[in-house]
């Protein structure tokens, strides 16, 4: 038991906490606000508080919690909405008042779950192997993993409360839910290096800037560039088993929107609600700042937990810049010496360590699972050289830069093809026949069109030779007919890979025909005047119509001969 | 319940900028409300910014001018600051600290509420879905305001953002349902404040307005309080009384400067342009108070208005605001006609939720997207024309230039006292898009074109 001596917003200093450890939890004041020790000097501890500290005064008591910051994992996670410390928000009051934490905040964890044993008593099961399963609705089965050893008791099939023991393995009691420290990565056996693509359903990404299962992506973009919409699209449509959506210091209305959408939409793969495979961590920008710092780690811990069951998981963190700002805020209040732009000196290493928790692995139980991390970055003033953006780029495998000019022209998703990279694209496309060539042609045409656009702006498009004017036309067709994808159109919102390929090939066929025609002296101005709308709107058409639309355009072009 | 006489502290250890450091305090909590009584009997108010052992750092809203280290008595309320809330605020004009300027009695309320508010549980937020119509074509058509949204007006010195804010405040409505405006003037000049007051006279007389005026010569630190008062009043009217409320906060740049002043006085490590590192979180704690609540009738729409210093949109105040708000309405000198809205740089992220079938017009979203796309192409064509001459442009590009011209004169330009119905706005919008050949209008469905497109004009 210690005593609070100083309160400065979320920074609290406490004296008399003998024997406390770094990162140990502390309950502050009469309302037992949770906080975490971030510095120790003698028996004086510096604590970051996870709740609003209004009213907390020097002289108030502070109690040691005895354990590091932990999150409660269990079958209640899928389909739920939680705060940064993974406390359920469903059932909490309208206003989140830290002085009145309703008991309902923990209620969901006390629910009963349909348990089914997967092993018999007396068997010896290795660590990480499933010993039981909870199958509820359309969620992926929640697997209870063995701590390793002989199964001396296992529960009968039937309803089981989260906290009840389901088995005794190697003398250890196993329950459905458990507390897991969040700042340390969960162990695994081996890491896989060969990339396996994760389909996102977004054409620009799947064709030009693919991401692998277990990969890492940063999405930098100034405000208004459609970062959140793109991330929400991926949360909805990527072919992962479990998605952890961390709204870290972002807008409340957007969180409400994503939760409502996920509850409404059907998962094309399972037929259930998309919400059933999603864990939402909602830490909006007006919620306590330090819980924002923790929410990134709780999110990854949840993903690792499902990875260990053999699932492919995706963590979407929107936005890592707000997390870095929380680090800066605390550093500033505790008087730490600042590095670049006031951020603490360990910003780069903290970012690297966070992204390093991604990966595709063989779990301790021998299954294959992955954690993919997609982190938004919000560069102040759109300045891509600011510390968070600059450092993040060093540690990720893919970068999807969102471009303000594209967004202002309402070109969504506003992913810049020139300013982005995907380091695993070569290895991933090599496995599929024709894929590398298709990607090469599309990105080649886009780059060439960009170069010629710059030239045309100086000289006028009319001065360019015919074949270059066709490249300009090709750039427009690819941008409008392929890269632009409407998040709101029911048919275009999600584009399966086969469809992406069809549309790309149809556009390339049209471009090829145009080139052939100008080589045969057909006036380029005549071609530019043609109606390309059937192919431009192919993305809105049923899949079987795409070939016919291509032929309509090709036939019209042919009439010029 | 025992009522304790408040303890008075008289040991003022230091006075610096807007801060008073009080020594010898016991049990004074962070963010507690403080009352400071001067020798003259004058009473001022403040908040505890830091509690360190027996030292409390208090920020004084009315400033520290005239406060002496001796003879000053400070008492603490034992809790964060609260104000009375309720319909009693309607029709009132008060200063930035909530004291009446209209000659009426102090505002009383049946209930009181903490000025900082509490975060709204995100799971109980209802996604916004209905429009707030302003009667201003450029806004209603292209950046539709949605009930429960927060959207900023970005402007530069010399542009009439206050005129626009006042026009929005005067004309905005929620389709016939009761509508209320809470207008917080932060650091406005007397002339500007008088204009706002005059423009909103009618609304005030109808009991649909609360006006809080912190003027340019009023205490600077009070500006930190003014938007919080406005939002606390508005939140109560929206979520407890159940009205549709629009809160206008103008000018937020003055607010941020007050915040920076306090931060500098405390010797905090500055972030960009010497603004404090917590500026984002602080602004979010204001703007995020907008919204709708599941199962309750009202809504709170927040409209921060700010002037970008030197017209720089990457300045921390507009930049961080833009990251929090759901869109922005950008005023620019490049558009010569009032309201000077730059359609290409303005955006309402929630627009799709509040516009379209059953809300405004079925073709609304596509029509707006088509106009934006055409204006974007017109801008490219104009840049090209400046280099190579208009005669070198293709016929289609010239039609786009004509469309941009028509857009500015026919649709965007509007008088400051002109309320345009949605029907009139759409009428003008179809006139504008019909400047293009029908086959160029790829974003509009053929049904919409059949109904709205005007051949051969």
Image (cartoon, rainbow, N blue to C red):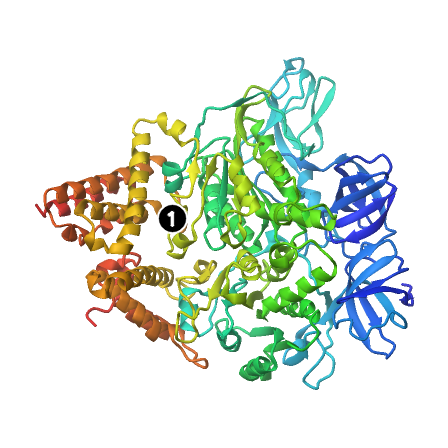
Q: Is residue A367 visible to us here?
A: yes
Q: Residue furthest left?
A: A561
Q: Nearer the viewer, residue A522 or B434?
A: A522
Residue A381, how many percent across, how many down?
A: 52, 55
Tell me the quadrant of the picture where the N terminus of chain A can be found: top right
Q: Is residue A500 left or right of residue B238?
A: left
The residue nearer to you, when weighing B62 against B282, is B62
At which x and y percent is residue B258? Answer: 67, 66
**As rendered, which of A102 and B430 lies closer to the eye?**
B430
Classed neighbour count for the residue bearing mark 1: other residues with Cα under 10 Å, few (<14), some (14–19), many (≥20): few
Q: Residue at x 63, y 62 (%)?
A: B286
Residue A88 shows in the view = no
Disc 1: which chain? A
Hey, which quadrant is residue B340 in on the image? bottom left
Where residue B216 sits in the image (x, y, percent)?
64, 76
Q: How many marks?
A: 1
Q: Quadrant of the C terminus of chain A?
A: top left
């Amino acid at each position: 038991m210690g005593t609070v001596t100083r309160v400065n917003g979320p920074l609290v200093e406490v004296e008399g906490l003998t024997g406390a450890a770094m990162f140990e939890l502390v309950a502050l004041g009469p309302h037992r606000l949770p906080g975490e020790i971030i510095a120790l000097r003698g028996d004086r501890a510096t604590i970051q508080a996870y709740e609003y500290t209004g009213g907390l005064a020097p002289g108030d008591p502070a109690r040691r919690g005895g354990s590091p910051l932990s999150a409660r994992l269990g079958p209640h996670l899928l389909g739920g909405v939680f705060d940064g410390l993974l406390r359920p928000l469903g059932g909490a009051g309208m206003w989140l008042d830290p002085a009145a934490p309703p008991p309902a905040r923990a209620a969901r964890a006390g629910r009963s779950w349909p348990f089914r044993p997967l092993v018999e008593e007396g068997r010896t099961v290795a660590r990480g192997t499933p010993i039981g399963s909870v199958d509820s609705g359309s969620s992926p089965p929640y697997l209870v993993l063995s701590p390793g050893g002989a199964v001396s008791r296992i529960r009968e099939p039937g309803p089981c409360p989260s906290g009840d023991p389901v088995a005794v393995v190697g003398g250890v009691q196993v329950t459905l839910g458990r507390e897991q420290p969040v700042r340390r990565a969960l162990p695994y056996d081996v890491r896989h290096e060969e990339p396996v693509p994760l389909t996102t359903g977004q054409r620009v990404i799947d064709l030009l800037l693919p991401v692998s299962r277990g990969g890492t992506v940063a999405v930098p973009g100034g405000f208004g560039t459609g970062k959140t919409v793109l991330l929400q699209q991926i949360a909805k449509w990527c072919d992962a088993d479990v998605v952890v959506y961390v709204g870290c210091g972002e807008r409340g209305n957007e969180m409400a929107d994503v939760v409502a959408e996920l509850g409404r939409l059907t998962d094309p793969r399972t037929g259930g609600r998309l919400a059933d495979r999603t864990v939402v961590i909602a830490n909006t920008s007006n919620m306590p700042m330090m819980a924002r710092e923790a929410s990134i780690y709780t999110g990854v811990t949840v993903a690792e937990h499902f990875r260990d069951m053999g699932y492919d998981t995706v963590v979407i963190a929107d936005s890592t810049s707000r997390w870095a700002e929380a680090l800066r805020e605390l550093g500033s209040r505790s008087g730490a010496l600042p590095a670049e732009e006031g951020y603490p000196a360990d910003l780069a290493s903290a970012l690297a360590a966070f992204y390093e928790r991604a990966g595709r692995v063989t779990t301790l139980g021998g299954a294959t699972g992955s954690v993919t991390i997609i982190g938004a970055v919000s560069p102040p003033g759109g300045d891509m050289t600011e510390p968070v953006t600059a450092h993040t780029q060093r540690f990720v495998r893919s970068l999807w830069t969102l471009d303000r000019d594209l967004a202002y022209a309402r070109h969504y998703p506003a992913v810049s093809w020139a300013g982005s990279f995907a380091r695993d694209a070569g290895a991933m496309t090599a496995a599929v026949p024709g894929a590398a060539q298709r990607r090469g042609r599309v990105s080649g045409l886009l780059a060439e069109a960009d170069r010629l656009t710059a030239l045309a702006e100086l000289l006028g498009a009319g001065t360019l030779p015919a074949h270059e004017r066709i490249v300009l036309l090709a750039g427009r067709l690819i941008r409008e007919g392929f890269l632009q994808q409407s998040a709101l159109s029911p048919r275009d919102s999600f584009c399966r890979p086969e469809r992406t390929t069809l549309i790309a090939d149809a556009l390339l066929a049209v471009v090829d025909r145009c080139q052939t025609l100008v080589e045969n002296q057909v006036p380029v101005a005549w071609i530019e005047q043609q109606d390309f709308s059937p192919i431009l709107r192919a993305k809105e058409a049923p899949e079987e119509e795409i070939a016919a639309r291509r032929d309509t355009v090709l036939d019209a072009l042919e009439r010029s001969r | 319940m025992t009522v304790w006489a408040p303890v008075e502290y008289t040991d003022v250890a230091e006075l610096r900028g807007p801060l008073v450091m009080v020594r010898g305090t016991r049990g004074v909590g962070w963010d507690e409300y403080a009352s400071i009584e001067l020798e003259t009997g004058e009473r001022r108010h403040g908040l505890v910014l830091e509690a360190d052992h027996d030292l409390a750092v208090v920020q004084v809203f009315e400033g520290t001018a005239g406060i002496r280290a001796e003879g000053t008595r400070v008492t603490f309320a034992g809790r964060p600051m609260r104000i009375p809330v309720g319909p009693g605020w309607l029709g009132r004009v008060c200063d930035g600290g909530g004291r009446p300027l209209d000659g009426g009695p102090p505002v009383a309320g049946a209930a009181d509420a903490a000025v900082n508010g509490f975060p709204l549980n995100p799971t109980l937020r209802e996604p916004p879905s209905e429009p707030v119509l302003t009667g201003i074509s450029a806004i209603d058509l292209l950046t539709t305001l949605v009930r429960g949204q927060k959207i900023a007006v970005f402007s530069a010195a010399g542009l009439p953002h206050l005129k626009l804010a006042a026009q929005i405040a005067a004309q905005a409505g929620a389709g016939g349902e009761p509508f209320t405006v809470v207008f917080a003037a932060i650091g406005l000049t007397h002339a500007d404040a008088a204009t706002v007051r005059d423009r909103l006279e009618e609304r005030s007389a109808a009991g649909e307005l609360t006006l809080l005026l912190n003027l340019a010569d009023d205490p600077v630190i009070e500006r930190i309080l003014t938007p919080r008062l406005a939002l606390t009043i508005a939140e109560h009217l929206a979520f407890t009384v159940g009205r549709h409320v629009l809160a206008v906060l103008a000018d937020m740049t003055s607010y941020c400067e007050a915040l920076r002043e306090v931060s500098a006085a405390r010797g905090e490590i500055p972030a960009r342009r010497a603004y404090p590192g917590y500026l984002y979180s602080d602004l979010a704690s204001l703007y995020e108070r907008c919204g709708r609540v599941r199962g309750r009738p009202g809504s709170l729409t927040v409209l921060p208005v700010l002037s970008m210093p030197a017209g720089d949109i990457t300045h921390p105040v507009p930049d961080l605001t833009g990251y929090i708000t759901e869109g922005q309405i950008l005023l620019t000198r490049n558009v010569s006609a009032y309201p000077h809205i730059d359609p290409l740089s303005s955006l309402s992220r929630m627009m799709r939720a509040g516009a379209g079938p059953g809300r405004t017009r079925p073709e609304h979203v596509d029509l707006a997207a088509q106009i934006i796309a055409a204006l974007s192409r017109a801008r490219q064509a104009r840049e090209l024309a400046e280099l190579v001459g208009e005669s070198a442009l293709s016929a289609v590009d010239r039609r786009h230039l004509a469309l941009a011209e028509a857009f500015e004169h026919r649709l965007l330009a509007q008088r400051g006292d002109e309320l345009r119905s949605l029907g009139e706005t759409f009428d003008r919008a179809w006139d504008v898009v019909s400047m293009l050949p029908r086959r160029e209008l790829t974003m509009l469905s053929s049904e919409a074109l059949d109904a709205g497109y005007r051949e051969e004009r």
